[in-house]
Image: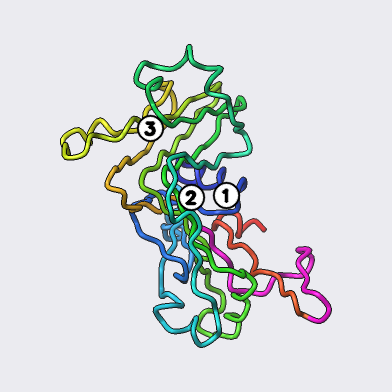
Amino acid sequence: MGGEQKYIDLLFRACRKFPSWDPEVIIEVGDWGRLTTGRPRWAFWRPKRCIFLKEGNIYQDNIAEKYGIPQPTVMGEEGSDGLTWFKSHTTRDMDVATSVERQTPTLAKCAVKAGFQFTASGGAVLVMADDHLTTIHPASSLRRLLEVDGLRGRVLVSEVHRCASYARYMAPPRTSSVVIGLTGPPPSGNPSSQENFKWVLSTNKGELDSKADNSGERKYCPLYKLVSLTEAEQGTGQRSSVDDETPLPLPDALPPWMASSS
């Protein structure tokens, strides 16, 4: 697997959500379209990717209003001074207070930080600052969209995480642990100090991709959930109640390499 495919694969298996390889691309709840590997079939040597190609939005296309889909609900809109993170199954949380000796002076001064330990195979972590979640509730209401011929077989964004800053970290094999921190915000009225507002690590191992912004604007979309606009197949364990009063949500969409092997 290439780095992008491995990162998406590890986090999706842990949280059933799609981590974005390019969080600066805005994704909105209600977007619908399809997933692609980003390569033609004949180019089998190219690394597989997981690209969401937007074809429309049920709110902008007036589909949601026609089929009674509720407006999205925003959770955590008031903001938070802490961090939110998602991690692979090969990763577990670590108490940063027990790893002071492994922290650099810059990291030790970070107001917010999180620590992680990895198995011998490494792992993946996504850390977000000032995160909020936009979702459609109840999720079962999206089943009404199965009546829309133009959406059949497509995927739909049902949840989106947006944040002001994020750090994506991939730990290679034999990386024991890492502490990830966000330095303090720059003084107001001094934009030049923005360059000192950044994510820092306790190790030089692994791959870090990050953005840190102190404007107060949640401009990054590093994680989102996709559901498949198809009926769940028999044998998946998904069943509605006998009287259909409590229909189940639509099945989760899968990354292309998982869908092709299922």
Marks 3 and 2: which is nearer the front? 3
Q: Nearer the viewer, residue 100 or 160?
A: 100
Q: Earlier in the sequence, mark 1 or mark 2?
A: 1
Q: Residue at x 22, y 34 (%)?
A: 187
**Highlighted magenta segment, given as a residue range:** 224-243
Q: Is residue 255 magenta?
A: no
Q: Residue at x 52, y 79 (%)?
A: 151
Circle 1 sits on which residue? 12
Secondary element at image label 1: helix
The location of residue 21, given as percent across then percent down, is 41, 49
Color theme of the render = rainbow
Q: Nearer the viewer, residue 26 or 131?
A: 131
Badge 2, how many Cα within 10 Å: few under 14, some, many 20+?
Answer: many
The location of residue 66, given as percent across then percent down, is 51, 88
Residue type beneath disc 3:
Leu
Q: Residue at x 77, y 73 (%)?
A: 240
Circle 3 sits on which residue? 182
The reply to whether callout 1 and callout 3 are in contact (CB within 8 Å) is: no
